[in-house]
Image (cartoon, rainbow, N blue to C red):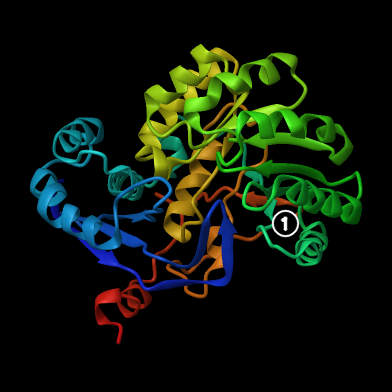
């Protein structure tokens, strides 16, 4: 079996509601679908979802990279030699994690379909048949709107992720307190600051952590200020998750060495694919650092990859965030993720286990939009 073609399709995709985090407001998403076809029939799908907070890649640049850099390396090669292919790709793709993630996913999907096994089997096997997921309450200047969303989501999820750092510190804490008061003590809360606090902000927040009842702070400080998190980590007062601080595999080793986090938010898109994500997970697991599987709100293909990744991890410290398809007007797959009792089932079909609707994919090609 040899790779016959590699194609990149830019997708015109938009969210049902504006998603606010950090200093970003997302209403659309510049996703790209990568399709790898073989001479014997099996094909595989991958998805890139470039986010400016993590990469300089764009929808246009990813298409160009796939056509001009990826295809020449892959065409004519045996997809079963996935790791050698990824090594060769690394030589021509510099600082392009989202492009690499899409290709890595497509290769795994292709191999799973060819071998008639789920991707999680190729990753080493599954530890669970479903993964718990958390809801997400986007930042809003009006705490009342945050409360309304939190109340609605608390009917589905046991965990809710909130955001802070965008507003004035005390006002942000008041917003978090308003949500806590509204949903009660049974719902577990954590907050993503997207590296927007200063060390002095973090010091001011500590007295209110117990009052609000937060289980985890995600990336409270910029990576360069991670040393200021060590004392908090050492006190075990609250879990600290590294997100923006872990963008390549070696960053996980830095977090472990510096003792700057107790949890790593593992997102395969930002890390450059499931292979890099597994390597990161192995560093964390061997060092006693917890894991949670995150996302950048991708569509169905990348979300399916995240579900297989979550299945292949021995332990998860916190629920996953793999709800992307629920946020979009458009869909790329015939099957949709479904949250039941706060969990999503791991796909069991060959490859990613989701069927890509190529007719719809062609209709959503951004190059044909007017």
Above/below status of 223 relative to 51: above
Packing grade of label 1 (10 A; few <14, some 14-19, many >=20) is few
Q: Residue at x 12, y 48 (%)?
A: 69
On the image, the x and y values in percent for residue 31 come to: 37, 62
On the image, the x and y values in percent for residue 121 come to: 44, 36
Q: Residue at x 74, y 18 (%)?
A: 236
**135 or 361: nearer the viewer:** 135
Report whether residue 349 is seen.
Answer: no
Count the numbered circles shown: 1
Report whether residue 147 is seen.
Answer: yes
On the image, the x and y values in percent for residue 183 come to: 87, 54
**275 or 368: nearer the viewer:** 368
Report whether 172 appears left or right of 337. right
Q: Residue at x 91, y 44 (%)?
A: 185
Above/below status of 284 relative to 276: above
Residue lying at the far bottom in this picture: please name it.
370
Q: Residue at x 54, y 24 (%)?
A: 226
Report whether 356 appears left or right of 139. left
**Residue on which disc 1 sits:** 340
From the image, which quarter does the C terminus lie in? Answer: bottom left
**285 or 214: nearer the viewer:** 214
**Residue 251 quadrant:** top left
**Residue 147 quadrant:** bottom right
On the image, the x and y values in percent for residue 118 come to: 44, 45
């Amino acid at each position: 079996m040899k790779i016959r073609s590699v194609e990149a399709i830019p997708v015109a995709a938009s969210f049902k509601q504006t998603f606010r985090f950090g200093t970003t407001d997302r209403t659309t998403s510049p996703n790209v679908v990568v399709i790898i076809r073989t001479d014997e029939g099996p094909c595989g799908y991958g998805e890139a979802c470039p986010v400016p907070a993590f990469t300089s890649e764009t929808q246009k640049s990813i298409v160009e990279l796939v056509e001009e850099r990826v295809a020449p390396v892959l065409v004519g090669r045996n997809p079963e030699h996935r790791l050698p292919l990824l090594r060769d790709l690394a030589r021509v793709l510099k600082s392009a994690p989202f492009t690499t993630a899409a290709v890595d996913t497509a290769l795994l999907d292709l191999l799973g379909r060819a071998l008639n096994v789920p991707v999680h089997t190729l990753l080493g096997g599954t530890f669970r048949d479903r993964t718990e997921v958390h809801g997400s309450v986007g930042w809003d200047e009006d705490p009342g709107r945050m409360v309304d969303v939190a109340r609605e989501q608390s009917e589905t999820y046991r965990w809710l992720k909130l955001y802070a750092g965008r507003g004035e510190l005390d006002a942000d804490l008041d917003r978090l307190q308003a949500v806590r008061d509204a949903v009660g003590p049974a719902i577990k809360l954590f907050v993503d600051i997207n590296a927007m606090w200063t060390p002095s902000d973090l010091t001011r927040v500590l007295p209110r952590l117990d009052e609000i009842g937060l289980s985890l702070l995600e990336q409270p400080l910029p990576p360069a200020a991670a040393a200021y998190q060590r004392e908090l980590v050492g006190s075990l007062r609250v879990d600290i998750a590294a997100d923006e601080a872990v963008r390549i595999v070696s960053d996980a080793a830095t977090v472990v060495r510096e003792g700057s986090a107790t949890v790593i938010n593992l997102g395969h898109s930002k890390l450059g694919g499931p292979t890099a994500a597994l390597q990161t997970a192995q560093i964390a697991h061997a060092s006693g650092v917890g894991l949670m599987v995150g996302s950048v709100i991708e569509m169905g293909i990348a979300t399916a990859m995240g579900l297989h990744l979550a299945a292949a991890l021995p332990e998860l410290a916190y629920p996953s965030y793999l709800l992307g398809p629920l946020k979009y007007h458009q869909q790329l797959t015939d099957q949709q993720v479904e949250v039941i009792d706060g969990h999503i089932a791991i796909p069991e079909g060959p490859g990613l286990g989701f069927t890509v609707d190529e007719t719809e994919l062609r209709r959503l090609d951004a190059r044909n939009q007017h």
